[in-house]
Image: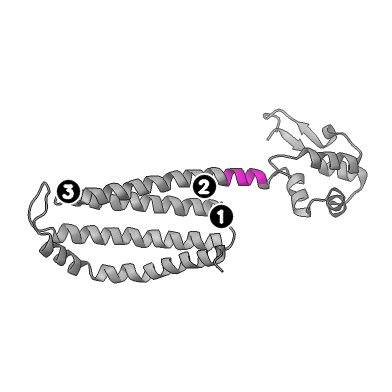
Amino acid sequence: MPIIVNLDVMMAKRKISSGDLAKKIDITPANLSILKTGKAKAIRFSTLEKLCEVLQCQPGDILEWRDEEEV
Amino acid sequence: MWNKTKSLQLSLLLVKVLFVFVPLLMTCVPVIAEWYDAVYGEGVGFLDGSVYWPLSITLYLAAICAMVCLYALHKLLGNIKKDEVFTPTNCKCLRIISWCCILAAIPFGLLGIWRFLSFIVALAAAFFGLILRVLKNVFEKAVELKEENDFTI
């Protein structure tokens, strides 16, 4: 999929663990793992909003579009 | 009080009963065919004469299809009991059942050469197979939607 989830990069920048982030945005660690590994098929605006709020970033910092050939 | 669990258990029980009943019926096929031949010996069809062998073969083939269907049904109900409803395995079970119905229609259709009445059974089996095929298509779509829903975070 040409949409890349850079959540792990942002988490490393903010020095936050998966468990803490999952707790703060109120999703299960399993679902956070799906998001981090790029297995997710879609992301709810509410989840994205919480992620941006906790990580203090813009949606563009978490999601990135790349040309399919590049990927 | 009647509830969903009891309904599922009843379905499972019926499948298990048929699992025993169908092989028992298979052992009685020669007797059934002989009885049919004696009682309805003068039937209408393209070919005249005894239907002992055509009917016996048809019933054996139908029983094999029924056994495969029952196995698939047992697996399907077992998965439903485990709360695994919209899964590719269940789609496969429905596909097997659908094909069994269609395959069972073939010998009954051939039996129609001797007895036209058998065409009705063949048509009913084929129609049932078609309905199940559509149901399988619905299930496949549901599996796709569920997967999309499960992977929406």
Q: Secondary structure at mark 1?
A: loop
Disc with the residue nearer the chain's start (1 vs 2): 1
The image quarter containing residue B61 is bottom left
Q: Secondary structure at mark 3?
A: loop
Instruction: Work out how far the residue at label 3 is from the one at label 2, CA to CA, in angstroms.
Output: 35 Å
Residue at the image point whose x is 75% and y is 45% from the top = A35
Sequence order check, earlier mark of 1 and 3: 1
Task: Name the residue beneath numbered marker 3.
Answer: B116
Q: In the picture, residue B32 is in which quadrant?
A: bottom left
Q: Amino acid at mark 2?
A: Phe
**Residue density around tag 2, few if under 14, some if 14–19, many if 20 or more, within 10 Å:** many
Vertical relation: B32 (above or below) A32: below
Specify the label residue B126 is tagged with.
Answer: none
| Outermost front residue | B1
Q: Nearer the viewer, residue B6 or A37?
A: B6
Q: Amino acid at mark 1?
A: Val
Q: Mark 3, residues whose alpha carbon is within 10 Å: few (<14), some, or many (≥20)?
A: some
Give the number of the mark in front: 3 or 2.
3
CB atoms of marks 3 and 2 within 8 Å: no
Chain letter of mark 1 equals: B
Q: Is residue B79 left or right of residue B58?
A: right
In the picture of the structure, the residue carrying the numbered disc 2 is B139
- If you read the primary sequence from the N terminus, does the residue marked by circle 3 or circle 2 appear first? 3
Q: Chain of mark 3?
A: B
- Depth order, front residue of B140/B43: B43
Q: Is residue B113 above or below residue B2?
A: above
